[in-house]
Amino acid sequence: MKTDAYSLVLPKSVTAEEGKDGALTLFLDGKEVGGVQVIPYENAEDLDIDQIEDEAVREKFEELLALVAPKGPVGHMFSSHVTDTQDTFCLSVFPDPQEQTEEPEETMHYFFPKGDLFYDIFFQQGGIPETEEQVILDSFALAS
């Protein structure tokens, strides 16, 4: 699948629906299981996971967390991630266990920076098989 900003390979079991501003929603058997969202973020390419221990950098990661999980307190963990196309970082977000929600237990976000944007590929835990997630991640490429 190809958009103006990026391309990716969808496994046969996964379908996609394009949304506004480069967004994409992924479905498996008619159920939403993830997608791609475009997040405006000044100097996205400068955010370096290897510097997360620095307080100022950590604050920038916390800002990014608030953009993808704006509903309040959540557990989370940032870590580095390598795909076939580039090194990036991921964010695991899980709802506060004290809150009773219909949200999935955990959502994984993979951030691909370009200029002042992050392309966030996200998957709901258990939404699609891990091997199919990996196909999507490894094939994701930003347009030149």
Image (spheres, rainbow, N blue to C red):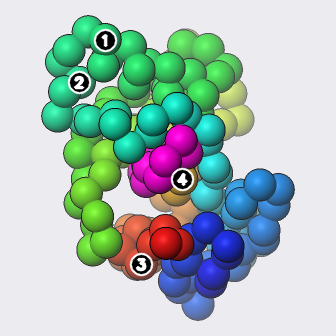
Tell me where residue 43 sits by quadrant. Answer: top left
Label 1 sits on residue: 56
Please report whichever mark, 3 or 4, sits nearer to the chain's N-terminal start: 4
- Marks 4/2: CA distance? 20 Å
For label 2, the SS is loop
Please report whichever mark, 3 or 1, sits nearer to the chain's N-terminal start: 1
Label 2 sits on residue: 52
Along the viewing direction, whichever of 144 and 93 lies nearer the viewer: 144
Label 4 sits on residue: 119
Q: Residue at x 50, y 28 (%)?
A: 64
Q: Amino acid at mark 4?
A: Tyr
Where does the magenta region start and end?
A: 107-117
Please report whichever mark, 4 or 2, sits nearer to the chain's N-terminal start: 2
Number of residues whose C-alpha sits closer than 10 Å to that of mark 2, classed few (under 14), some (14–19) or many (20 or more): some
- Marks 3/4: CA distance? 14 Å
Number of residues whose C-alpha sits closer than 10 Å to that of mark 4, classed few (under 14), some (14–19) or many (20 or more): many
State the mark number for residue 139. 3
Please report whichever mark, 2 or 3, sits nearer to the chain's N-terminal start: 2
Number of residues whose C-alpha sits closer than 10 Å to that of mark 1, classed few (under 14), some (14–19) or many (20 or more): few
**Magenta stretch: dominant secondary structure:** strand
Along the viewing direction, whichever of 27 and 83 lies nearer the viewer: 83
Q: Specify whether residue 144 is painted magenta.
A: no
Residue that lies at the very extreme toward the right in this rendered image: 20
Please report whichever mark, 1 or 4, sits nearer to the chain's N-terminal start: 1
Q: Is residue 22 left or right of residue 33?
A: right
Residue that lies at the very extreme toward the bottom in this rendered image: 12
Image coords of residue 74 (percent x, y): 50, 20
